[in-house]
Amino acid sequence: MGQIIAIANQKGGVGKTTTAVNLSASLAAAEKRTLLVDMDPQANSCSGVGLDKGKQELTIYNALLGEVSAEEIVVHTDLKHLDILPANTDLIGAEIELVTAMARELKLQGVLSSIRDQYDYIIIDCPPSLGLLTVNALTAADAVLIPLQCEFYAMEGMSQLMNTIRLIQKELNPRLTIRGILLTMFDGRNNLSHQVSEGIRQHFNDLVFQVVIPRNVRLSEAPSHGLPVLLYDITSRGATAYLELAKEIIETGN
Ligand code: ADP
Ligand code: MG
């Protein structure tokens, strides 16, 4: 049964989508059957794997509302072993429409239950909030991966995120573990990057992944070509780092 990993941090611009897309592609490149789930109305994970944003008629929104099954919305990408459950801006409405629904926090778990067996890994890209969509992702997940940008305010919001995780463990999903904290956009020439990453390692110890994602222009260029970085420039430091992350995740198992 596929391991479900949610990529979450309520701060925007910390590298959630970049991580979701490139970790998924790297797992697929290692021949792991991988499903990327776009839970962000901005649908940047969709464009990151080459889907035309806004062209998908049926999306995760329809599945969350119980109108269609996951099988009916899954899209195969150009990369062998990588599929995606797409999103679009309809998803903004789901936060409101689900408010009165029964067991509204369990909708994504229900959607994924029917296709979980077909994958080794299911990676969920969360929106930049701790609202109902992120709560659904954390309730469906076995583990959460938290990207932290190596900048001065990196830890801002972390206690709120940790509280949310604890609450979900207590009330909704006792299986949920913290799969790791991932340092992103690390700039080796910048003293602050070193100070911040050392501070985070001191505070969270073994929870921090060994691999660090460097600031790399190839990672920011690849989405405009609709490609994960390993198909855009396999020689880039960004591609190497995400392949390493996939390896670390595969090797450390559950
Ligand atoms: P989030 O999903 O958390 O909002 P994104 O993954 O969309 O964050 O990243 C925010 C911006 O930073 C995007 O323009 C992305 O291309 C860029 N970016 C992310 N990670 C890196 C990196 N390691 N090096 C350079 N640019 C990056
Ligand atoms: Mg994003």
Image: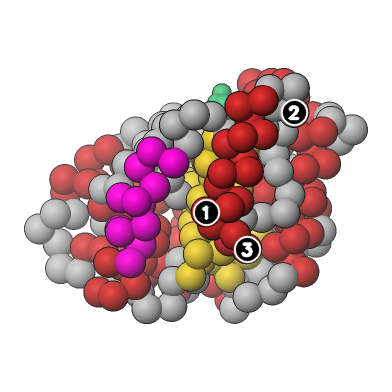
Pick whichever, 76 or 214, lies toward us: 214
- Specify the quadrant that holds the C terminus: bottom right
Of 108 and 173, nearer the camera is 173
> Is the C-beta separation of discs 1 and 3 under 8 Å?
no
Could you say which disc has been placed on residue 203 in the image?
1
- The local secondary structure at tag 2 comes to loop
Q: Which residues are magenta?
A: 155-166
Q: Amino acid at mark 2?
A: Gly
For the N terminus, the quadrant is bottom right
- In terms of secondary structure, what is the magenta stretch mainly? helix
x and y, in percent, of residue 2 in the image: 60, 72
Q: SS at mark 1?
A: helix
- Residue 117, image x, y percentages: 58, 76
State yes or no: Cβ of the residue under disc 3 lies below 8 Å from any atom of ligand 1: no
Say whether mark 1 is within 8 Å of ligand 1: no
Q: Residue at x 61, y 35 (%)?
A: 195
Q: Earlier in the sequence, mark 3 or mark 2?
A: 2
Q: Nearer the viewer, mark 2 or mark 1?
A: 1
- Residue 188, label in figure: 2
Is residue 173 visible in this depiction of the protein?
A: yes
Quarter of the image for residue 153 reads top left
| Residue of label 3 | 206
Local crowd size for mark 1, using a 10 Å CA cut-off: few (<14), some (14–19), many (≥20): few
Question: Which mark identifies residue 104?
Answer: none
Q: Residues within 10 Å of mark 3 (few under 14, many from 20)?
A: few
Image position, residue 186 (x, y; %): 67, 32
Disc 3 is placed on an element classified as helix
Q: Residue furthest left?
A: 100
Type of residue at label 3? Answer: Asp
Q: Is residue 193 above or below residue 135?
A: above
